[in-house]
Image: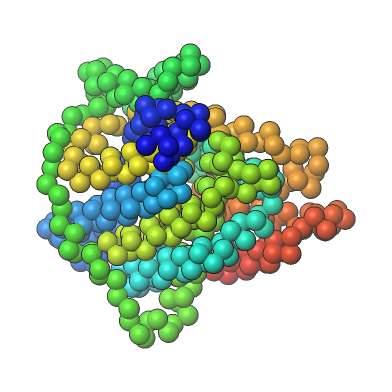
Amino acid sequence: MDKYFGISAAGSTIRREIAAGVTTFLTLAYIIFVNPSVLVQAVPGIFDQSGNIVNQAAYNSYYGAFMVATIMGSVIATLVMGLYANYPFALAPGMGLNAYFTYTVCMKLGISWQLALAAVFIEGIIFIVLTVTGARTFVARAVPQPVKAATGAGIGLFIAFIGLKNAGIVLPDPVTAVTLGQLNRPDTLLAIIGFFITAILFALNIPGSILIGIILTTVIGAVPAFGVTHYQGIIGKIPDISPTFLKFQFDAQTLLTGTFWIVVGTFFFVDFFDTLGTLTGLAEGTGFTKKNGEIERATKAYLADAVGTVVGAIFGTSTVTTYVESSTGIAVGGRTGLTAVVVAILMLAMLFFSPLALTIPSAATAPALIFVGVLMIKSLLSIKWDDITDAVPAFVTLAMIPFTYSIANGIALGIITYPIIKALSGKWKEVHWFTWLLAILFIGYLSFFR
């Protein structure tokens, strides 16, 4: 095992890789339950116009099937990432992509969820072709280095914001957009305590500090004064996959419409650059990049994402992508594919132990996300801040990822800014020709198709 994954050569240990896998799993296990709750809304006849369930039997059937699809898509993609690409990254259906699938494609455009799955399937096939031919790596090379470096820190701010929101520390506000939450609420106070526990354990160089922090926070949450942690049981029945398995539909008439291919293109765009941004950010912060900023074994890593998307569509879920929550396992010390394999095994086990995962409250995982934001901000050190033509696109990328709640938007706006400011400052020779093309495409996308 040590030789296959190169654990010792990566400066890690088997115990550390296992701890990292468990930590990553705990921070992304929520997707097992959140993703089905989003996708099931795309199925007609289950909800009324007010969002109330009117067909409980159908809801239970489709929710369970979408849950199994979520798990299987995640497991297979993560195994490819671990066993083939040898990276400690976990994959699962993307949150923004599942929202686009349900609320825009199905509910707004009126495309059936079966046809939407067909669009996801086609997008995955396109990704596989681009990855195998090397075109995907070529596009990644055209992303400017300041944008790549800022992406890591931007993701750090992004997941910290998610953690703050999940903890109730930051709340939406109709006047100021966001505001400080009620810090004396039991779940919010528990998350704050968990953050300090994690930070102190990390400062004391205690191995597995983030995982220990999650466990201790969960235990504290069971104290009556908090009442946040609720035991949900251990073993549950495996749901039936038949309602969603191989249900994607290829309608000849729909396949010839421009709307359908715009949907395919949008899935393609968001998946590509979310994955690119996440992989770049994770690699930048953990030394998985070459001197020129390119990701080592990039083709293999991208292939894991592409295969996951195709398999996910077959089982019945929206686009599968690399998860930023992988950074929590990396922070624990995960450096090889063994971490990803552990995540995949635990995800698969959730087919049998789904009630157990519900015991860990979001107030226990939110502190991990916030703390990892602290660790990922260091990628800003590699940016030449004294060169304003590098600093501006880096800042745009850094700011727009959390402010637009999208990794893809941040990268797009950063890439648009980079060639413009370089060219108008007399440094047009520093811009790759394909970066110009990407900038033009992004302008078109953000202006007309987003």
Q: Residue at x 28, y 31 (%)?
A: 360
How is the rendered protein coloured?
A: rainbow
Across and down, in percent, residue 77 comes to: 37, 53
- Toward which corner of the image does residue 448 lie, by quadrant? bottom right
Quick check: 131 above or below 214?
below
Count of all numbered marks drawn on residues in the image: 0
Quick check: 352 above or below 239?
above
Question: Is the N terminus in the top left, top right, bottom left or bottom right quadrant?
Answer: top left
Across and down, in percent, residue 75 comes to: 31, 49
Q: Residue at x 36, y 86 (%)?
A: 253
Across and down, in percent, residue 324 comes to: 47, 43
- Left or right: 37 with respect to 60? right
- Left or right: 213 with respect to 403? left
Across and down, in percent, residue 235 comes to: 13, 38
Quick check: 262 above or below 4?
below
Q: Residue at x 23, y 64 (%)?
A: 244
Quick check: 271 above or below 105?
above
- Toward which corner of the image does residue 163 lie, by quadrant? top left
- Left or right: 299 with respect to 229? right
As rendered, which of 297 and 401 lies closer to the eye?
297
